[in-house]
Protein backbone atom coordinates (compact mmCIF):
# COMPACT_ATOMS: atom_id res chain seq x y z
CA UNK A 1 0.00 0.00 0.00
CA UNK A 2 2.74 2.45 0.98
CA UNK A 3 6.41 2.09 1.95
CA UNK A 4 6.98 0.76 5.48
CA UNK A 5 3.35 -0.17 6.04
CA UNK A 6 2.63 -2.70 8.79
CA UNK A 7 0.27 -5.63 8.27
CA UNK A 8 -1.25 -8.42 10.27
CA UNK A 9 -1.42 -11.31 7.78
CA UNK A 10 -3.37 -14.57 8.18
CA UNK A 11 -4.21 -17.63 6.15
CA UNK A 12 -5.80 -21.03 6.78
CA UNK A 13 -5.74 -24.43 5.22
CA UNK A 14 -8.63 -25.20 2.90
CA UNK A 15 -11.59 -26.77 4.69
CA UNK A 16 -9.67 -26.37 7.95
CA UNK A 17 -7.06 -28.92 6.89
CA UNK A 18 -3.59 -28.96 8.41
CA UNK A 19 -0.95 -26.94 6.62
CA UNK A 20 1.77 -28.25 8.93
CA UNK A 21 1.92 -32.03 9.35
CA UNK A 22 5.44 -32.44 10.67
CA UNK A 23 8.31 -30.56 12.30
CA UNK A 24 9.92 -30.31 8.88
CA UNK A 25 6.84 -28.48 7.57
CA UNK A 26 7.15 -25.81 10.25
CA UNK A 27 10.86 -25.41 9.51
CA UNK A 28 10.09 -25.33 5.80
CA UNK A 29 7.62 -22.47 6.19
CA UNK A 30 10.09 -20.47 8.30
CA UNK A 31 12.69 -21.06 5.60
CA UNK A 32 10.34 -19.69 2.93
CA UNK A 33 9.66 -16.64 5.10
CA UNK A 34 13.38 -16.01 5.38
CA UNK A 35 13.68 -16.29 1.60
CA UNK A 36 11.05 -13.56 1.24
CA UNK A 37 13.03 -11.42 3.66
CA UNK A 38 16.14 -11.77 1.50
CA UNK A 39 14.42 -11.49 -1.88
CA UNK A 40 11.87 -8.74 -1.24
CA UNK A 41 13.15 -6.83 1.83
CA UNK A 42 10.19 -8.09 3.87
CA UNK A 43 10.44 -7.52 7.62
CA UNK A 44 8.85 -10.15 9.86
CA UNK A 45 8.36 -8.98 13.43
CA UNK A 46 6.20 -11.79 14.83
CA UNK A 47 4.75 -15.10 13.72
CA UNK A 48 2.80 -18.03 15.04
CA UNK A 49 2.39 -21.19 13.01
CA UNK A 50 -0.61 -23.24 14.12
CA UNK A 51 -1.47 -26.68 12.71
CA UNK A 52 -4.10 -25.32 10.27
CA UNK A 53 -3.29 -21.60 9.98
CA UNK A 54 -0.66 -18.94 10.51
CA UNK A 55 -0.43 -15.37 11.80
CA UNK A 56 2.29 -12.91 10.78
CA UNK A 57 3.12 -9.34 11.72
CA UNK A 58 5.14 -7.87 8.88
CA UNK A 59 6.39 -4.58 7.50
CA UNK A 60 6.98 -3.86 3.80
CA UNK A 61 9.60 -1.14 3.15
CA UNK A 62 9.02 -1.56 -0.60
CA UNK A 63 5.20 -1.61 -0.44
CA UNK A 64 5.15 -5.12 -1.95
CA UNK A 65 3.08 -7.26 0.40
CA UNK A 66 1.31 -9.09 -2.41
CA UNK A 67 4.60 -10.11 -4.01
CA UNK A 68 5.94 -11.31 -0.66
CA UNK A 69 2.86 -13.35 0.14
CA UNK A 70 2.69 -14.88 -3.33
CA UNK A 71 6.18 -16.20 -2.70
CA UNK A 72 5.46 -17.45 0.82
CA UNK A 73 2.15 -19.13 0.06
CA UNK A 74 3.08 -20.35 -3.40
CA UNK A 75 6.55 -21.73 -2.70
CA UNK A 76 5.48 -23.32 0.59
CA UNK A 77 2.53 -25.01 -1.15
CA UNK A 78 4.85 -26.42 -3.82
CA UNK A 79 7.29 -27.78 -1.25
CA UNK A 80 4.54 -29.13 1.01
CA UNK A 81 2.89 -30.95 -1.90
CA UNK A 82 6.19 -32.31 -3.15
CA UNK A 83 7.09 -33.64 0.29
CA UNK A 84 3.73 -35.25 0.99
CA UNK A 85 3.00 -36.50 -2.53
CA UNK A 86 0.04 -34.17 -3.01
CA UNK A 87 -1.07 -31.60 -5.58
CA UNK A 88 -3.53 -28.74 -5.80
CA UNK A 89 -4.24 -25.86 -3.46
CA UNK A 90 -3.22 -25.91 0.19
CA UNK A 91 -4.69 -22.70 1.56
CA UNK A 92 -8.34 -21.71 1.80
CA UNK A 93 -7.80 -18.79 -0.53
CA UNK A 94 -5.94 -15.53 -0.77
CA UNK A 95 -4.30 -14.35 2.43
CA UNK A 96 -6.14 -11.85 4.64
CA UNK A 97 -4.36 -8.72 5.76
CA UNK A 98 -5.05 -5.78 8.04
CA UNK A 99 -3.13 -2.51 7.79
CA UNK A 100 -1.85 -1.61 11.27
CA UNK A 101 -0.75 1.74 12.66
CA UNK A 102 2.79 1.86 14.03
CA UNK A 103 1.84 2.48 17.67
CA UNK A 104 0.58 0.47 20.62
CA UNK A 105 -1.53 -1.64 18.26
CA UNK A 106 1.69 -3.35 17.17
CA UNK A 107 2.45 -4.39 20.73
CA UNK A 108 -1.05 -5.71 21.20
CA UNK A 109 -0.75 -7.73 18.01
CA UNK A 110 2.56 -9.29 19.05
CA UNK A 111 0.95 -10.46 22.28
CA UNK A 112 -2.18 -11.63 20.44
CA UNK A 113 -0.10 -13.60 17.92
CA UNK A 114 2.16 -15.19 20.51
CA UNK A 115 -0.76 -16.16 22.77
CA UNK A 116 -2.65 -17.97 20.00
CA UNK A 117 -1.60 -21.48 21.13
CA UNK A 118 -2.69 -20.70 24.70
CA UNK A 119 -6.13 -19.46 23.61
CA UNK A 120 -6.48 -22.57 21.42
CA UNK A 121 -5.70 -24.83 24.37
CA UNK A 122 -2.64 -26.36 22.69
CA UNK A 123 -0.31 -25.30 25.50
CA UNK A 124 -0.77 -23.82 28.95
CA UNK A 125 2.03 -21.26 28.73
CA UNK A 126 3.26 -19.18 25.79
CA UNK A 127 6.84 -20.34 26.25
CA UNK A 128 5.75 -23.97 25.84
CA UNK A 129 4.90 -23.47 22.17
CA UNK A 130 7.77 -24.05 19.78
CA UNK A 131 6.48 -22.58 16.53
CA UNK A 132 6.15 -18.90 17.30
CA UNK A 133 8.59 -16.02 17.55
CA UNK A 134 7.97 -15.63 21.29
CA UNK A 135 11.23 -17.36 22.16
CA UNK A 136 13.10 -14.94 19.89
CA UNK A 137 11.96 -12.04 22.09
CA UNK A 138 13.52 -13.75 25.08
CA UNK A 139 16.85 -14.30 23.35
CA UNK A 140 19.82 -12.20 22.29
CA UNK A 141 21.24 -15.02 20.16
CA UNK A 142 22.41 -14.12 16.65
CA UNK A 143 20.31 -16.92 15.17
CA UNK A 144 17.30 -14.59 15.57
CA UNK A 145 18.86 -11.61 13.81
CA UNK A 146 16.59 -12.21 10.82
CA UNK A 147 13.54 -11.34 12.94
CA UNK A 148 12.67 -7.64 12.99
CA UNK A 149 12.04 -7.35 16.73
CA UNK A 150 14.08 -4.26 17.66
CA UNK A 151 11.34 -1.79 16.75
CA UNK A 152 8.81 -3.69 18.88
CA UNK A 153 11.10 -4.03 21.89
CA UNK A 154 12.02 -0.34 21.70
CA UNK A 155 8.35 0.46 22.30
CA UNK A 156 8.55 -1.29 25.66
CA UNK A 157 11.81 0.10 26.96
CA UNK A 158 14.55 2.41 25.81
CA UNK A 159 17.17 0.34 27.60
CA UNK A 160 18.31 -2.84 25.79
CA UNK A 161 19.19 -4.49 29.12
CA UNK A 162 15.58 -4.15 30.28
CA UNK A 163 13.89 -5.23 27.04
CA UNK A 164 13.40 -8.91 27.84
CA UNK A 165 12.06 -8.21 31.32
CA UNK A 166 9.68 -5.56 29.99
CA UNK A 167 8.52 -7.91 27.25
CA UNK A 168 7.84 -10.73 29.72
CA UNK A 169 5.89 -8.33 31.91
CA UNK A 170 3.85 -7.16 28.93
CA UNK A 171 3.09 -10.73 27.87
CA UNK A 172 1.82 -11.49 31.36
CA UNK A 173 -0.70 -8.65 31.32
CA UNK A 174 -4.33 -9.14 30.38
CA UNK A 175 -4.99 -8.99 26.66
CA UNK A 176 -6.86 -6.06 25.16
CA UNK A 177 -10.55 -7.03 25.05
CA UNK A 178 -11.26 -4.79 22.05
CA UNK A 179 -8.49 -6.48 20.08
CA UNK A 180 -9.83 -9.92 20.99
CA UNK A 181 -13.32 -8.85 19.87
CA UNK A 182 -11.91 -7.54 16.59
CA UNK A 183 -10.29 -10.87 15.75
CA UNK A 184 -13.37 -12.82 16.76
CA UNK A 185 -15.46 -11.07 14.10
CA UNK A 186 -16.44 -13.00 11.01
CA UNK A 187 -15.73 -9.91 8.93
CA UNK A 188 -12.64 -8.24 10.33
CA UNK A 189 -11.74 -4.62 9.57
CA UNK A 190 -9.17 -3.73 6.93
CA UNK A 191 -7.46 -1.16 9.15
CA UNK A 192 -6.38 -1.30 12.79
CA UNK A 193 -5.51 1.98 14.45
CA UNK A 194 -6.88 5.15 15.94
CA UNK A 195 -9.39 7.38 14.19
CA UNK A 196 -6.75 9.67 12.66
CA UNK A 197 -4.85 6.73 11.17
CA UNK A 198 -8.01 5.17 9.74
CA UNK A 199 -9.06 8.48 8.18
CA UNK A 200 -5.59 8.98 6.73
CA UNK A 201 -5.68 5.59 5.01
CA UNK A 202 -9.22 6.15 3.77
CA UNK A 203 -8.35 9.56 2.36
CA UNK A 204 -5.13 8.46 0.69
CA UNK A 205 -6.37 5.19 -0.76
CA UNK A 206 -10.10 5.68 -1.09
CA UNK A 207 -10.12 5.39 -4.87
CA UNK A 208 -8.05 2.24 -4.57
CA UNK A 209 -10.59 0.51 -2.39
CA UNK A 210 -9.80 -2.80 -4.04
CA UNK A 211 -6.07 -2.23 -3.53
CA UNK A 212 -4.13 -5.45 -4.09
CA UNK A 213 -2.20 -5.01 -0.83
CA UNK A 214 -5.39 -5.01 1.21
CA UNK A 215 -7.75 -7.70 -0.10
CA UNK A 216 -10.49 -6.73 2.34
CA UNK A 217 -10.19 -3.01 1.65
CA UNK A 218 -13.48 -2.77 -0.27
CA UNK A 219 -14.93 -2.37 3.22
CA UNK A 220 -13.44 1.13 3.23
CA UNK A 221 -15.73 2.29 0.44
CA UNK A 222 -19.42 3.13 0.78
CA UNK A 223 -21.67 0.31 -0.33
CA UNK A 224 -23.71 0.48 -3.52
CA UNK A 225 -26.87 1.60 -1.75
CA UNK A 226 -25.01 4.39 0.05
CA UNK A 227 -23.72 5.66 -3.30
CA UNK A 228 -27.26 5.70 -4.68
CA UNK A 229 -28.64 7.52 -1.63
CA UNK A 230 -25.90 10.13 -1.85
CA UNK A 231 -26.61 10.69 -5.55
CA UNK A 232 -30.35 11.02 -4.98
CA UNK A 233 -29.81 13.51 -2.18
CA UNK A 234 -27.29 15.54 -4.17
CA UNK A 235 -29.34 15.71 -7.39
CA UNK A 236 -32.75 15.86 -5.61
CA UNK A 237 -34.07 12.83 -7.47
CA UNK A 238 -35.68 9.49 -6.72
CA UNK A 239 -33.83 6.20 -7.01
CA UNK A 240 -35.89 5.23 -10.05
CA UNK A 241 -34.42 8.24 -11.88
CA UNK A 242 -31.02 6.54 -11.68
CA UNK A 243 -32.34 3.77 -13.91
CA UNK A 244 -33.76 6.01 -16.64
CA UNK A 245 -32.30 5.58 -20.09
CA UNK A 246 -33.42 7.79 -22.97
CA UNK A 247 -31.77 7.90 -26.34
CA UNK A 248 -29.40 10.86 -26.78
CA UNK A 249 -30.11 12.03 -23.20
CA UNK A 250 -27.19 12.09 -20.74
CA UNK A 251 -28.28 10.82 -17.32
CA UNK A 252 -25.58 12.42 -15.20
CA UNK A 253 -26.60 10.92 -11.81
CA UNK A 254 -26.64 7.42 -13.27
CA UNK A 255 -23.27 7.93 -14.95
CA UNK A 256 -21.80 9.17 -11.66
CA UNK A 257 -23.20 6.11 -9.90
CA UNK A 258 -21.58 3.75 -12.39
CA UNK A 259 -18.29 5.63 -12.20
CA UNK A 260 -18.12 5.67 -8.38
CA UNK A 261 -19.11 2.00 -8.19
CA UNK A 262 -16.23 1.14 -10.51
CA UNK A 263 -13.59 3.53 -9.19
CA UNK A 264 -14.00 3.43 -5.43
CA UNK A 265 -15.46 -0.05 -4.98
CA UNK A 266 -13.80 -1.90 -7.83
CA UNK A 267 -17.09 -3.58 -8.69
CA UNK A 268 -17.33 -5.67 -11.84
CA UNK A 269 -19.15 -4.20 -14.82
CA UNK A 270 -21.68 -7.01 -14.59
CA UNK A 271 -22.47 -6.30 -10.94
CA UNK A 272 -22.78 -2.57 -11.58
CA UNK A 273 -25.18 -3.25 -14.43
CA UNK A 274 -27.36 -5.39 -12.18
CA UNK A 275 -27.54 -2.63 -9.58
CA UNK A 276 -28.50 0.01 -12.18
CA UNK A 277 -30.80 -2.20 -14.26
CA UNK A 278 -28.46 -2.25 -17.27
CA UNK A 279 -28.48 -5.57 -19.10
CA UNK A 280 -25.18 -5.29 -20.97
CA UNK A 281 -21.86 -4.84 -19.16
CA UNK A 282 -20.50 -3.24 -22.35
CA UNK A 283 -23.12 -0.49 -21.93
CA UNK A 284 -21.83 0.13 -18.41
CA UNK A 285 -18.29 0.44 -19.74
CA UNK A 286 -19.38 2.81 -22.50
CA UNK A 287 -21.20 5.13 -20.09
CA UNK A 288 -18.17 5.26 -17.77
CA UNK A 289 -15.80 6.04 -20.65
CA UNK A 290 -18.10 8.77 -21.97
CA UNK A 291 -18.21 10.32 -18.51
CA UNK A 292 -14.40 10.41 -18.43
CA UNK A 293 -14.42 12.28 -21.74
CA UNK A 294 -16.94 14.78 -20.37
CA UNK A 295 -14.73 15.32 -17.31
CA UNK A 296 -11.96 16.62 -19.58
CA UNK A 297 -14.24 19.15 -21.26
CA UNK A 298 -16.65 20.23 -18.52
CA UNK A 299 -15.25 22.00 -15.47
CA UNK A 300 -18.62 22.23 -13.72
CA UNK A 301 -19.05 18.46 -14.09
CA UNK A 302 -15.64 17.93 -12.49
CA UNK A 303 -16.68 20.22 -9.66
CA UNK A 304 -19.86 18.23 -9.00
CA UNK A 305 -17.82 15.03 -9.06
CA UNK A 306 -15.42 16.47 -6.47
CA UNK A 307 -18.30 17.49 -4.21
CA UNK A 308 -19.88 14.05 -4.43
CA UNK A 309 -16.55 12.35 -3.79
CA UNK A 310 -16.00 14.47 -0.69
CA UNK A 311 -19.43 13.54 0.63
CA UNK A 312 -18.82 9.85 0.05
CA UNK A 313 -15.37 9.95 1.64
CA UNK A 314 -16.67 11.65 4.77
CA UNK A 315 -19.26 8.96 5.44
CA UNK A 316 -18.38 6.29 8.01
CA UNK A 317 -18.73 2.72 6.92
CA UNK A 318 -20.31 0.29 9.33
Image (cartoon, grey):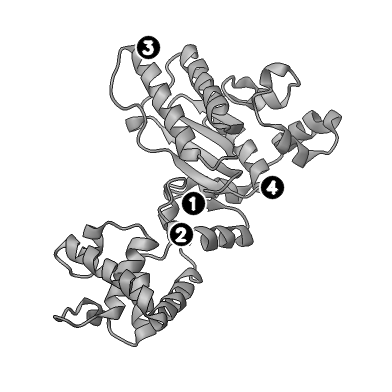
Answer above or below: position of 36 versus 275.
above
Residue 289: x percent and y percent? Answer: 28, 66
Q: Residue at (60%, 32%) from the top-left corner?
A: 44
Q: Quadrant of residue 236?
A: bottom left
Q: Closer to us: mark 2 or mark 4?
A: 2
Residue identified by numbered label 2: 220
Q: Earlier in the sequence, mark 2 or mark 1?
A: 1
Residue identified by numbered label 3: 83
Residue identified by numbered label 4: 104
Residue 144: x percent and y percent? Answer: 67, 21
Q: Are the residues at dot 3 and dot 1 in contact (C-beta closer than 8 Å)? A: no
Q: Quadrant of residue 161?
A: top right
Q: Are the residues at dot 2 and dot 4 in contact (C-beta closer than 8 Å)? A: no
- Residue 115 visible in the picture: no
Task: Determine the CA span between mark 1 and mark 4.
Answer: 17 Å
Q: Are the residues at dot 2 and dot 1 in contact (C-beta closer than 8 Å)? A: yes
Q: Are the residues at dot 2 and dot 3 in contact (C-beta closer than 8 Å)? A: no
Element carrying mark 3: helix
- From the viewer's side, name the closer residue of 55 and 260: 260
Task: Determine the CA span between mark 4 and mark 3.
Answer: 40 Å
Task: Determine the CA span between mark 2 and mark 1.
Answer: 7 Å
Residue identified by numbered label 1: 190
Category of crowding for the residue at label 1, using alpha-carbon neighbours closer than 10 angstroms: few (below 14), some (14–19), many (at least 20): many
- From the viewer's side, name the closer residue of 230 and 250: 250
Q: Quadrant of residue 57?
A: top right
Q: Residue at (67%, 23%) from the top-left corner?
A: 135
Amino acid sequence: MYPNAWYNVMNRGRRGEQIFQSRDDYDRFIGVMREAIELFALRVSAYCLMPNHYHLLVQTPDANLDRCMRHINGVYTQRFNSTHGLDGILFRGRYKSIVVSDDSYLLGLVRYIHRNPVRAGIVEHVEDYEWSSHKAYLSHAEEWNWLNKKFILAMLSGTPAQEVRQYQKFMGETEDESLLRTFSLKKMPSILGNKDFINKIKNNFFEKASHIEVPESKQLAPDMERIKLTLCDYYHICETDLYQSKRAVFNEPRAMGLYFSRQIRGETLKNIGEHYHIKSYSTVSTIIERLKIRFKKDGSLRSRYAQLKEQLMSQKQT
